[in-house]
Image (cartoon, grey):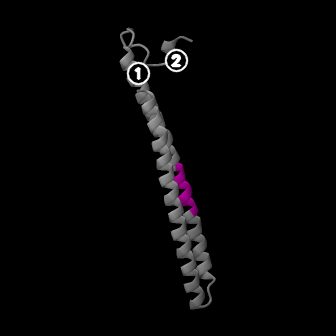
Amino acid sequence: MNDQFQNPFATLAGGGAMPANVKESFENMTRAFTGWMTNANRMQAETIRFMNDRFNKDMQAFTRFGACKKPEEFMSLQSELVAELVKDYMEEGNKVVAMFADMARSAVPSAAQKK
């Protein structure tokens, strides 16, 4: 297959060859957009996973609250569930920060590589 079919930016609309700097610019923009979309999808998938897990835990909490027979049981369960909630959000926060760090690391070498 020739290059003009592999890369849609290989030729200009009029049929002339695209200058090297314009072609490189399009390739850089394509790489950046692809990386951005990949990372946005990762972040979205992680957010949906976390929210689904938290929703399920919250629904289970209602059932557990309904089984309490004494105020002490209710207070103890409430304390347990709040501790679990805080732990879950802290872990998720750490995960998100790690994902952002990974995204930054993966973006920097590709930008530096082209210089």
Quote the CA–CA distance across marks 1 and 2.
15 Å
Say what secondary structure mark 1 lies in.
helix
Picture disc at residue 70: none
What residue is drawn where x is 50% and y is 13%? Answer: 3
Picture disc at residue 24: 1
Q: Earlier in the sequence, mark 1 or mark 2?
A: 2
Image quarter of residue 57 = bottom right
Q: Residue furthest top?
A: 16
Q: Quadrant of the C terminus?
A: top left
Question: Is 56 positioned to the left or the right of 40 in the image?
Answer: right
What residue is drawn where x is 36% and y is 18%? Answer: 21
What residue is drawn where x is 47% and y is 54%? Answer: 97
| Crowd class of label 2 (few under 14; some 14 to 19; many from 20; radius 10 Å) | few
What residue is drawn where x is 56% and y is 90%? Answer: 71
Residue 114's spot in the image, x, y percent?
43, 27
Q: Please determine whether, in this image, residue 63 is positioned above or below residue 109.
A: below
Marks 1 and 2 in Cβ contact (< 8 Å) = no
Residue 58's spot in the image, x, y percent?
56, 70
Dot 2 amino acid type = Gln
Magenta highlight range? 45-53
Q: Which residue is mark 2?
A: 6
Q: Quadrant of the N terminus?
A: top right
The foreground one among 68 and 108 is: 108
Residue 81's spot in the image, x, y percent?
56, 75
Dot 1 amino acid type = Glu
Say what secondary structure mark 2 lies in.
helix
Give the main secondary structure, helix, strand or loop, of the magenta stretch. Answer: helix
Q: Please determine whether, in this image, residue 90 is positioned above or below residue 44.
A: below
Image quarter of residue 18 = top left
Between marks 1 and 2 in the image, the one whose residue lies nearer the viewer: 1
